[in-house]
Image (tube, helix red, strand yellow):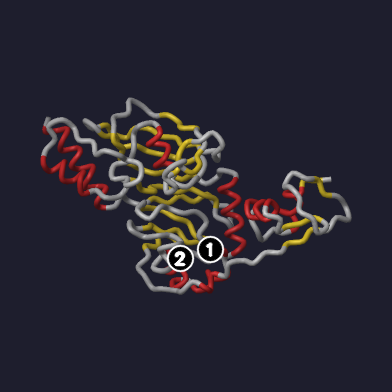
Amino acid sequence: NQRLDLVAAQLFPDYSRARLQTWIKEGQLKVNSSAARPRDTVYLGDELSVDVVLQAEREWEAQAMPIDIVFEDEHLIILNKATDVVVHPAAGHRDGTLLNGLLSHCPSLKEVPRAGIVHRLDKDTTGLLMVAKTLESHVQLVEQLRLREVKREYEAVAQGVLTGGGKVDAPLGRHPVNRKRRAVVEDGQEAVTHYRVLNRYRSHTHIHVQLETGRTHQIRAHLSHINIPLVGDPLYSGRLQMPAGCSPVLAACLRSFKRQALHARRLTLQHPATGETMVWEAQLPQDFKDLLTVLDDDVRAV
């Protein structure tokens, strides 16, 4: 007399609820050999069966690469991702990804879904990323994300001057024209982003951003939606914005900043084995620091 997705979570505790719901919706997790819906009720005597082929991470090649490890124990890795690093293999990026590097650093990750990668950062977004080293830790961290218990804080530089902080609560889905982008759409996934001002410049704002949900391109798409796209964002920024009479140094800095000015600065979570609240911070990368310095100099020069 319980929902199918709740019963499945009890019977198959090694897999996240999100994964189990996907299997149900795709007809891979059946009740009495028949497809069902996550909300359908199951009863004593019903038989649940799963018929899936898991992607074996051992199919991906282990490739040595420098990884900035901030913290590591037998359950968890926290790393500081550099720019120009793809997190997971995909079309056009079959190797040379962070996943390949993690398999070299810790070969046992081949036994964990997606080599333990619990969430992702875009290729040119820098900062903190968590990796589960065991299946048990993976399930725990995925559940913390689902319950919105993981605190993910970012710093960003946006085009435009904000007068104060706020919240963007707008569903995201694929852009109707540009399939590489996300956009606010009525039938999209729930997406909530909180932001506040750290510093204002003449035509830009240094902001603190906190995710409540974690959709693809969420910060980039949400800030673009409220007309403050990130500096350097190749998909969402549009026309380059310059303050009136800006110096050649600032103009050159803005033109040469070829990635979104976004950094995952702070990460807070409960340790998957001990339950202890743990907090990590990653310093801003040099290109981000240089951008802030030039923006500060521009304000002082006026």
Q: How many numbered circles does the render carry? A: 2
Q: How many angstroms separate mark 2 from mark 1 (CA)?
A: 7 Å
- 125 displayed left or right of 110: left
The kind of residue on which mark 2 rests is Leu
- 146 displayed left or right of 103: right
Instruction: Return the residue nearer the eye: 137 or 222.
Output: 222
Q: Quadrant of residue 183?
A: top left
User: Which residue lies at the image location 41% right of the left edge and 64% below the top edge?
Assistant: 93
Question: Which numbered disc covers residue 134?
Answer: none
Whether 108 is drawn above or below 292: the answer is: below
Contact (Cβ within 8 Å) of mark 2 with mark 1: yes
Quadrant placement of the N terminus: top right
Residue 38 lies, in percent from the top left, at 72, 47
Quadrant placement of the C terminus: top left
Instruction: Return the residue nearer the eye: 224 or 150.
Output: 224
Residue 263 lies, in percent from the top left, at 35, 48
User: Which residue lies at the image location 67% right of the left edge and 64% below the top edge?
Assistant: 52
Whether 47 is drawn above or below 292: the answer is: below
The residue pinned by badge 2 equals 99
SS class, disc 1: helix
The kind of residue on which mark 1 rests is Arg
The residue pinned by badge 1 equals 114
User: Which residue lies at the image location 29% right of the left edge and 52% below the top edge?
Assistant: 285
Neighbour class for label 1 at 10 Å: few (<14), some, many (≥20)?
many
Along the polypeptide, which appears first: circle 2 or circle 1? 2
Instruction: Return the residue nearer the eye: 275 or 107.
Output: 107
Q: In the current view of this chain or complex, which residue is farthest to the front?
A: 177
Neighbour class for label 2 at 10 Å: few (<14), some, many (≥20)?
many
